[in-house]
Amino acid sequence: MFLIAFLGGILTVLSPCILPVVPFLFAGADRKRSSILLTLGGMALTFALISSLAVVSSEWVIQASNAGRHVALIVMVLFALSLISARVGDWLARPFVLLGNRLDPNSRKVSGPLGSLMIGVATGLLWAPCAGPILG
């Protein structure tokens, strides 16, 4: 059983949607072992919560799929408009630029255990939609 779990983990890490995320986990040479363990713990916790939520709310997920399809179409239209018009592109990018400026390490640095845990939680949110179906 451990061999199957290990092989499942290897296949998950090597999948095309996961492999680009892995370097962000271990970026920064000055990180301590406890920081890396907190990051991995946050990632595992978030992955487990998202996976459990998907199993428990499977009926809701089916109903939300239709709404998600409509939202995806609207987002695609907005992206298309942003590619056609620079003004629309600037308008759509403005909130993300402001968020990036707030998260800039020079202006506001979150370090220590909380920062490591939050990196793990964010990575777990990226990891769950892709790794879940592969592991399933």
Image (cartoon, grey):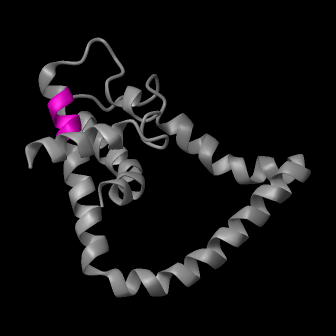
| Residue 119 seen from this side | no
Total residue callouts = 0
Q: Residue at x 73, y 63 (%)?
A: 76
Q: Is residue 42 visible?
A: yes
Q: Residue 54: x, y in percent?
A: 31, 72
x and y, in percent, of residue 40 in the image: 21, 37
* Residue for point 45% across, 84% down: 62
In reply to whether residue 40 is colored magenta, the answer given is yes
- Asked if the magenta segment contains residue 123, the reply would be no
The reply, left or right, for residue 85 in relation to residue 73 is right
Write the start and end of the magenta stretch as one range.
36-41
Q: Nearer the viewer, residue 3 or 13?
A: 3
Tell me the quadrant of the picture where the C terminus can be found.
bottom left
Q: Residue at 34% across / 43% down in the picture?
A: 12
Residue 61 picture location, percent across and down? 41, 80
Q: Nearer the viewer, residue 49 or 31?
A: 49
Q: Residue at x 33, y 41 (%)?
A: 11
Is 66 positioned to the left or the right of 3 in the image? Answer: right
Point out the residue furthest to the top here. Answer: 29
Q: Label the magenta part by its dominant secondary structure.
A: helix
In the rendered image, the vertical position of residue 111 relative to residue 83, given as above or below: above
Please say if 79 is above or below 58.
above
Would residue 70 be found to the left or right of residue 43 on screen? right
Q: Is residue 117 left or right of residue 11?
A: left
Between 34 and 97, the residue placed more toward the observer is: 34
41 shown above or below 77: above
Give x and y (percent) for residue 129. 41, 58
Q: Residue furthest right?
A: 84
